[in-house]
Image (tube, rainbow, N blue to C red):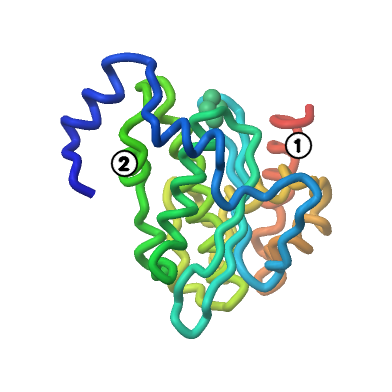
Amino acid sequence: MTNTKTDLRDQQGKSWVYSDIVKEHFFHPQNILLPGEEVDYQSDGLGYVGSPACGDMMKMWIKVDQKEDRILECKWQTFGCASAIASTSMLSVIATEKGGMKLDDAMKIKAQDILERLGGLPNRKIHCSVLGDKALQSAINDYFKKTEQFDRVKIEGAKIIDDQLKITDKDIEEAVLEGADTLEKVQVKTKVGTGDPSCLPEVEQLIKFYQDKYYG
Ligand code: FES
């Protein structure tokens, strides 16, 4: 990654022209999950995020080499725009190239790293590149939880609701976005409150809040 921040700002700000790399990844997205294709990653990680800036969605699955602690595969789907598609395509390449990134390093991938590899994006499209890295972090956290490595779960900008299982308000939001509309269904997806049920009243409030927000 040789570009400086100044280089990137220039490329993003001067015009609305997309770099050739962005166009290549938009027209030929890597690791995208096509309609009809399925992933069999039930035991690995699933991440799901929405963009507060535009309302678009991103879903990401990872397959992990448990012994090496590396990402073997990274598949994704999005309702996002061309910039989101190109950014996430590049992110999936970064995460899986050279034998796969170590999970701790993949957790630290930032939008800036993706922009550097893409040769920049127009300023107003920067938020689209955040969807992929947030979905990847969510998928890695999901893997850590499924493999009971709770001390490795990294939580940014989210409130922990279930301290025992490190489940946040974002996890509840994701479960609702995936269609869980009752406490029981949210528990099937997240296991929230199954160890310490004292959080359940707050979970029920959150389910109602996100139901109203997205489907009300
Ligand atoms: S405008 Fe929503 S992801 Fe780009």
Task: Report whether residue 202 is seen.
Answer: no
Q: Position of residue 82 (x, y in %)?
A: 54, 29
Query: Which residue shows up at 37% across the image and 28% down it?
Result: 19
Extreme bottom residue here? 67
Q: Position of residue 128 (x, y in %)?
A: 48, 32
Q: Is residue 56 above or below residue 197?
A: above
Q: Position of residue 56 (x, y in %)?
A: 61, 31
**Tag 2 residue:** 112
Q: Ligand 1: which quarter?
A: top right
Q: Judging from the image, what secondary structure is the residue with disc 1 in? A: helix
**Tag 1 residue:** 211
Q: CA distance from mark 2 to mark 1?
A: 33 Å
Q: Nearer the viewer, residue 126 or 160?
A: 126
Q: Is residue 155 above or below residue 8?
A: below
Disc on the earlier residue, 2 or 1: 2
Query: Which residue shows up at 82% across the image and 46% down it?
Result: 181
Q: Nearer the viewer, residue 20 or 10?
A: 20
Q: Judging from the image, what secondary structure is the residue with disc 2 in? A: helix
Image quarter for residue 143?
bottom right
Q: Nearer the viewer, residue 216 or 136?
A: 136
Three-letter code for the amino acid on which mark 1 is drawn = Gln
Callout 1: 10 Å neighbours few (<14), some, many (20+)?
some
Three-letter code for the amino acid on which mark 2 is drawn = Gln
